[in-house]
Amino acid sequence: GENVEQHPSTLSVQEGDSAVIKCTYSDSASNYFPWYKQELGKRPQLIIDIRSNVGEKKDQRIAVTLNKTAKHFSLHITETQPEDSAVYFCADHNAGNMLTFGGGTRLMVKP
Amino acid sequence: SAVISQKPSRDICQRGTSLTIQCQVDSQVTMMFWYRQQPGQSLTLIATANQGSEATYESGFVIDKFPISRPNLTFSTLTVSNMSPEDSSIYLCSVVTTGSHYPDTQYFGPGTRLTVL
């Protein structure tokens, strides 16, 4: 089955610094890559997604890049703030609108 | 995006009993899924809830343990049967709404936190 690897599992940055989380996938047919943010005790919330026909997408301080040849995609958060502290999950889309999730990255932004 | 609610939000149950979790959406959705999130872990798909037919289960999950119903396009239930402490997890439903893109975005309910003693 599909496998999504996510790194790092934990990431600690100073407020104002950038954070980068990387995911690799195995299914070359994957064509949709969402990122979810999950705060403690809350549901996963979609923060950005990218489809396979583009290489980069940006939304304010958040950007996602996709390299289909290498089968990896990354989340970039600039000017990090304490409220960015959460667990972030990448995912890729399989047949039937099903998502396979990465293992998650716990991001801690220190004030 | 759809508004998704789940009941109960949390429960503490005794081993050997069963719990039914409800997922209600405020609009008709094309697809509904059930996930399990064990403490400190990622999300694992249990099954796709199919409207009017049997659910489609992922490897490692069986209907006898996790029976699912979906009587219409806005409602689904997941039952955790004959519970053991290993079933202690957060159970989340998710939905895909009809949109202009394929694949469409998947949204999650608030989750049900289950503790089995």
Image (cartoon, rainbow, N blue to C red):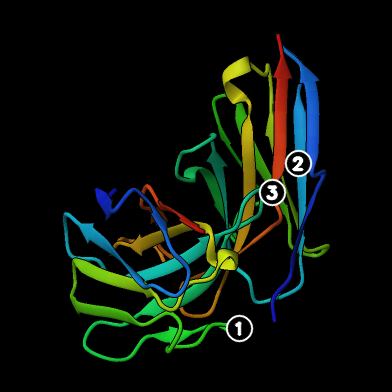
Which circle's residue, 3 or 2, is located before the other in the chain?
2
Instruction: State the separation of the CA atoms marked 3 and 1.
Output: 21 Å
CB of mark 2 within 8 Å of CB of mark 1?
no
Question: Dot 1: few (<14), some (14–19), or many (≥20) neighbours within 10 Å?
Answer: few
* Residue at 60%, 31% in the rendered image: A62
Whether callout 3 and callout 2 share a subunit is answered: yes
Viewer-proximal residue among B17 and A1: B17
Residue A104 numbered mark, or none: 3
Camera-side mark, 3 or 1: 1
Q: Pinpoint residue A58: horizontal percent, then vertical percent.
A: 58, 35
Indicate the secondary structure of the residue bearing disc 3: loop
Q: Chain of mark 2?
A: A
Name the quadrant containing residue A33.
Answer: bottom right
Amino acid at pointer 1: Gly
From the image, state whether disc 3 or disc 2 is nearer to you.
3
Q: Which mark is residue A21?
A: 2
Disc 1 designates what residue? B60
Q: Which mark is residue A44?
A: none
Measured as percent of width and height from the top left, residue B105 is found at: 41, 57
Q: Is residue A18 visible?
A: yes
